[in-house]
Amino acid sequence: MSRKIRVLVVDDDAVLRRVVSEQIAKAGFDARAAGSGEEALKLLGDADLDVVLLDIRMPGLSGLDALREIRKLDDPPEVIMLTADTSLGTGIEAMRHGAYDYLTKPSTLDEIEAVIRKADEKRRLVRQNAGLREAVRARGGGGGGNSDDAPALVFNSRAMGDLVALAETAARSDSTVIITGESGTGKDVFARFIHARSARSAQPVITVNCAALPEALFESEFFGHERGAFTGAGAAKPGLIEAADSSTLFLDEVGETAPATQAKLLQFLEEGRFRRVGSTRDRAADVRIIAATNRRLAEEVAAGRFRSDLFYRLNVISLHVTPLRERAEDVPALVEHFLARNRERFNRPALDLSDEARRRLESYDWPGNVRELRNLLERAAALATGDRIEAEQILPARDNSTDTAAANANANTSPDTSTSAQQPPATLEELERQHILRVLHETGGNRERASAVLGISARTLYRKLREYETDAAPGALATED
């Protein structure tokens, strides 16, 4: 959704005001005009403008006084002063009060156009940086999957080759993209791949997990809010849309959005404009949307759970990532890719798989897709005591006798993991407890290593172990040193 730079021309000379407005409009700008400083401030209160061309000498509110008031606005436009005074003093005074630059009359259209574009570029960078800082701060320091480098797409299959070619084509356009597929197939990797090869790649992609965003917070998170918009809004805050201006917004799990949220998202997609919560002023943002879902959206539309108009608006370019079980020829390449990453991560250049381990990986049906393969190899690398990872460290043999033997071995060696066929299903808390204790057992009681494998902090692991000891007999489990 490309946009024109919105420029306000402020001059009490009606002829000059009209000529400048008409000429910059012909140059491709969205031009508006005001005959006084007071009128300019009113227009700025009602519309989101990028650059103001402001005459210094005007009756009533002077240009410098208007400049001071403009700089007090939340998210003010950049101001370029126009002056007939050829001395440096007036221009320097204007820039001291926050003007981006100044031009002396008469200036050529080329000069005006060049300064407007530079001023707009500065404003966009300031807004993006503010939005990114706020988005990172709101997420506890996580950027939501941003990457400066193009992600690797590893494959051997023809199906994936065709899909990558389609993604390359999509990257060259600015159209909305919907990526579908089962969980773990790498939809987010395709989203970052498309962004990295697009004209927007200089800016980081902004990612939001729609399933994790409460409906009550959607408007504030997406569109931002003004100071005092609601209880606790002590300061104005830009939203994800502003953070993604001139970049890409990746809506992961878009199929999980609530109906009211879908309506608001559709309105932005249609118009490219939005309002912060608590504001009466429309703002514009140049954002490319890529969405992903593991749901069948056409079926969701038929069932009335997803808006048909939003589906059609998202479904401009469609990519479907096939599950790993349907492209088994990709498994060897993925295995080598993740092995190489783990060799570097764990500083073990000789780490490798036995032939039997490779055969089992290639014959497995991968219900968790690429994510399961990645995590399984990382776990095996983290737990391996030697440089050779054997088959049983990766996947158990699939015949019944081996499964039974493995179950018996776990019952004899792993703490608190045995179950009986007559016992009721374990609760989520009990399954978590069993998994944590199993990993702790496999790491030889090394809690730092166990916390790394589990993906939790050492402090969280210590707390959980203390809880388990409270439930069990005192002293039954290791306590914090």
Image (cartoon, grey):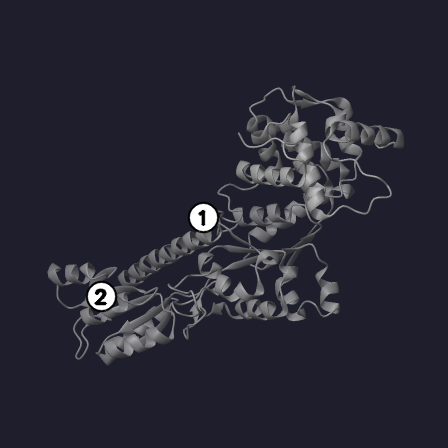
Residue 332 lies, with reference to residue 80, above or below; the image says above
Q: Which mark is residue 341?
A: none
Measure the alpha-carbon separation of dots 2 and 1: 30 Å
> Counting residues from the N terminus, which is met first, the one under dot 2 or under dot 1?
2
Q: Residue at x 13, y 63 (%)?
A: 90
* Front-most of residues 440 and 265: 440
Residue 218: name its quadrant: bottom right
User: Residue furthest toward the front?
Assistant: 474
For label 2, the crowd category at 10 Å Cα-Cα, with few meaning under 14, some 14 to 19 and many 20 or more, is many
Q: Is residue 192 left or right of residue 332?
A: left
Residue 412 position within the rendered picture, expressed as x and y whole percent measured from the top left: 78, 27
* Front-most of residues 417 and 324: 417
Q: For the residue marked with disc 2, what is the amino acid?
A: Met
Q: Is residue 77 left or right of residue 63?
A: right
Mark 2 lies on residue: 81
Residue 430: name its quadrant: top right
Q: Residue at x 78, y 24 (%)?
A: 356
Residue 22 lies, with reference to residue 253, above or below; the image says below
For label 1, the crowd category at 10 Å Cα-Cα, with few meaning under 14, some 14 to 19 and many 20 or more, is few
Can see residue 106?
Answer: no
* Front-most of residues 156 and 44: 44
Q: For the residue marked with disc 1, what is the amino acid?
A: Ala
Mark 1 lies on residue: 202
* Front-most of residues 7 and 342: 342
Residue 103 position within the rendered picture, expressed as x and y whole percent measured from the top left: 21, 63
Q: Secondary structure at mark 2?
A: strand
Residue 439 position within the rendered picture, expressed as x and y whole percent measured from the top left: 66, 32
